């Protein structure tokens, strides 16, 4: 059989082994040649990253005098201060929210939420809204957590009620408000009631307008068969920090820019007109994007404005501002933010006016 196969191939039987043995060195030489070529190619590649950093460093070195002059401009210094303060205030709570979001996605089974929240969406909204009392954090933390709740199958209306209540009625916010307004417990109570009402009403409204309509983009889930819990945690955290963090910086840049360009004379001119003052401070809260743990101190400093107007500032700010809208776009989509933000603004403003008239 060996001779027949060799004969059919046109080679003597003994030459097959020689051909086989001669092929191996050729393959080794070919492999070695390719490896050598790849090595030479990798050595000849231009390190663009290092080159770019070098050019940037050189440009900064050459233009340092011009850069110092630019940074000395008062408006630019104010813009930088506002931008850095917003980001610095928000980042710790953003990280906390991302870690909590990843923990919920990776380690909390969907059955937990089925048992914890009522199946009826109308009843699930107040349950989720009340849960905001126990979670310290600002709006930057609540967005990724709400996204994680939707990802785990929680009714969107309930998740959104939690998104609005958590940054507005948690213990840290209530304590900071009490410190900012010493001897005025009615201000703390008014803020709590108006903020909780806002979360519940918006949640119930969303049950109506979101039913059967694809208005909210479900955040991506990284859980699945064959994926460990820690891998799900890592992937979810990495995804949320990139999206939420990127839009946080973008929103902070816009807020700082508008804050610098807003004339102080305009604020002083409307302070004496109550209804206009309420609207102006509500819009001001959207623009300046102050973290909910710090906004009470800003409101307390606006002594020229009526107390109801300052309450509107504290109620509107934690539920709708520029950086929060930007983060919502990144997590839930533009279509969602275009509908959700105006509804939230109107509801928060009305709740602040009604509760302020009632309690203050």
Image: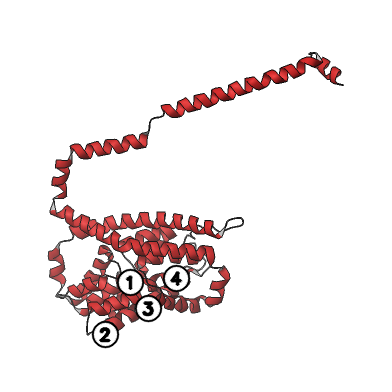
Residue 297 locus on image (x, y percent) = 22, 73
Counting residues from the start of the chain, the first of labels 3 and 4 encountered is: 3
Pick the residue in front: 61 or 281.
Answer: 61
Q: Earlier in the sequence, mark 3 or mark 1?
A: 3
Residue 147 visible somewhere in the drawing: no
For label 1, the residue is: 346
Q: Residues within 10 Å of mark 2 (few under 14, many from 20)?
A: few
- Asked if labels 1 and 4 touch by Cβ distance under 8 angstroms, the answer is no
Q: Which mark is residue 206?
A: 4
Q: Which mark is residue 196?
A: 3
Q: Secondary structure at mark 1?
A: helix
Which quadrant of the structure image shows residue 262? bottom left
Residue that carries the numbered disc 2 in the rendered image: 185
Seen at 12% across and 65% down, the residue is 265
User: Which residue: 58% across, 25% down?
Assistant: 31
Q: Residues within 10 Å of mark 3 (few under 14, many from 20)?
A: many
State yes or no: discs 2 and 1 in contact (Cβ < 8 Å): no
Q: Residues within 10 Å of mark 4 (few under 14, many from 20)?
A: many
């Amino acid at each position: 059989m060996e001779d027949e196969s060799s004969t059919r191939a046109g080679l003597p039987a003994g030459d097959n082994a020689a051909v086989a043995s001669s092929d191996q060195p050729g393959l080794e030489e070919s492999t070695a040649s390719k490896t050598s070529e790849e090595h030479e190619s990798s050595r000849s590649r231009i390190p663009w990253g290092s080159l770019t950093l070098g050019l940037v460093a050189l440009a900064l070195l050459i233009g340092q005098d011009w850069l110092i002059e630019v940074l000395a401009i008062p408006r630019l210094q104010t813009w930088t201060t506002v931008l850095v303060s917003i980001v610095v205030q928000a980042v710790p709570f953003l990280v906390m929210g991302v870690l909590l979001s990843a923990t919920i996605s990776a380690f909390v089974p969907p059955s937990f939420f089925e048992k914890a929240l009522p199946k009826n969406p109308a009843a699930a909204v107040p349950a989720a809204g009340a849960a905001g009392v126990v979670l310290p954090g600002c709006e930057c933390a609540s967005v990724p957590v709400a996204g994680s709740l939707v990802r785990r199958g929680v009714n969107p209306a309930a998740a959104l009620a939690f998104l609005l209540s958590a940054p507005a009625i948690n213990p840290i916010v209530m304590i900071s408000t009490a410190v900012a307004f010493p001897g005025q417990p009615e201000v703390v109570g008014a803020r709590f009631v108006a903020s909780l009402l806002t979360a519940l009403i918006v949640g119930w409204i969303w049950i109506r307008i979101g039913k059967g309509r694809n208005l909210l983009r479900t955040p991506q889930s990284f859980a699945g068969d064959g994926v460990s819990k820690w891998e799900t945690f890592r992937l979810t955290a990495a995804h949320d920090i990139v999206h939420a963090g990127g839009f946080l910086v973008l929103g902070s840049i816009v807020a700082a820019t508008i804050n610098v360009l807003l004339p102080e004379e305009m604020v002083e001119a409307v302070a004496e007109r109550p209804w206009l003052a309420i609207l102006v401070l509500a819009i001001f809260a959207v623009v300046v994007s102050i973290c909910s743990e710090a906004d009470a101190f800003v409101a307390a400093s606006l002594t020229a404005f009526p107390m109801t107007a300052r309450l509107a500032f504290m109620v509107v700010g934690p539920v709708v501002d520029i950086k929060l809208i930007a983060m919502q776009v990144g997590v839930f989509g533009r279509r969602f933010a275009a509908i959700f933000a105006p509804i939230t603004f109107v509801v928060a403003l009305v709740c602040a006016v009604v509760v302020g008239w009632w309690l203050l």
